[in-house]
Image: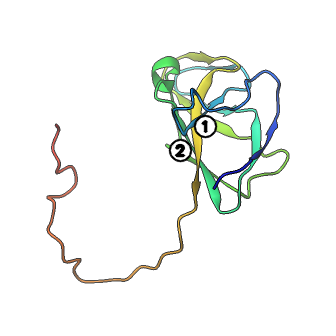
Amino acid sequence: MTGTIKIKYFTDKIERLCYVGGKSDWIDLRAAEEVEMKAGEFQLIPLGIAMELPAGYEAHVVPRSSTFKNYGVIQTNSMGIIDETYCGDNDQWFFPAYALRDTVIHVNDRICQFRIMEHQPAIEFQEVDQLGHEDRGGHGSTGKQ
């Protein structure tokens, strides 16, 4: 898929979306409001955008690698999935954050990132008694190094 994605901005206070340095296929998202959080608090942090994704695609939203180090927050749903039907004029994207320490996130801070992915193709499940392959040793069997 190549093409254009329609995007609506809810504020002029955040930088417009772009690829960072042209080296990553993840695109940073920014806090659209200043958010103060105490340890143990949950908040939906507005990202200041809505998009019309192409049919058959969804956005995967995850924290940036530095989000916890810089702000002490984790994403409560581990990874957010936004499908192409979430595209109304008021369907703003949010980052669901849980604070593990007191923190302040400022307007325009890069707190998460997204990429779009094609939907999984339709699949069927076939129940069998054996898979017929060699066992690898169970969960966590590849060792520490």
Give the amino acid type for the residue marked by disc 1 in the picture. Answer: Pro
Which quadrant would residue 15 be assigned to in this image? top right
Residue at image location 52% in from the left, 34% down from the top: 63
Give coordinates of residue 71: x percent, y percent. 53, 20
Question: Secondary structure beneath disc 2?
Answer: loop
Residue at image location 58% in from the left, 44% down from the top: 115
Query: Disc 2 or 1, which lies upstream in sequence?
Result: 2
Which residue corresponds to mark 1?
A: 96
In the displayed structure, would residue 39 be above or below residue 118?
Answer: above
10 Å crowding of disc 1: few (<14), some (14-19), many (20+): some
Residue closest to the eye, 123 or 67: 123
In the displayed structure, would residue 130 be above or below residue 82?
Answer: below
Residue at image location 22% in from the left, 54% down from the top: 139
Q: Do the residues labelled 2 and 1 touch (CB within 8 Å)?
A: yes
Left or right of residue 10: residue 81: left
In the displayed structure, would residue 96 be above or below residue 123?
Answer: above
> Going by the picture, which residue comes out furthest to the right?
89
Question: Secondary structure beneath disc 1?
Answer: strand
Give coordinates of residue 9: x percent, y percent. 81, 34
Give coordinates of residue 96: x percent, y percent. 61, 37
Give the amino acid type for the residue marked by disc 2 in the picture. Answer: Asn
Residue at image location 74% in from the left, 23% down from the top: 14
In the displayed structure, would residue 70 be above or below residue 60?
Answer: above
10 Å crowding of disc 2: few (<14), some (14-19), many (20+): few
Give coordinates of residue 145: x percent, y percent. 16, 37
Which quadrant would residue 110 be assigned to in this image? top right
Q: How many labels does the image show?
A: 2
Instruction: Check residue 77 in the rendering and tell me which mark sits there, or answer none.
Output: 2
Left or right of residue 89: residue 111: left
The Cα–Cα distance between marks 2 and 1, rounded to whole angstroms, is 7 Å
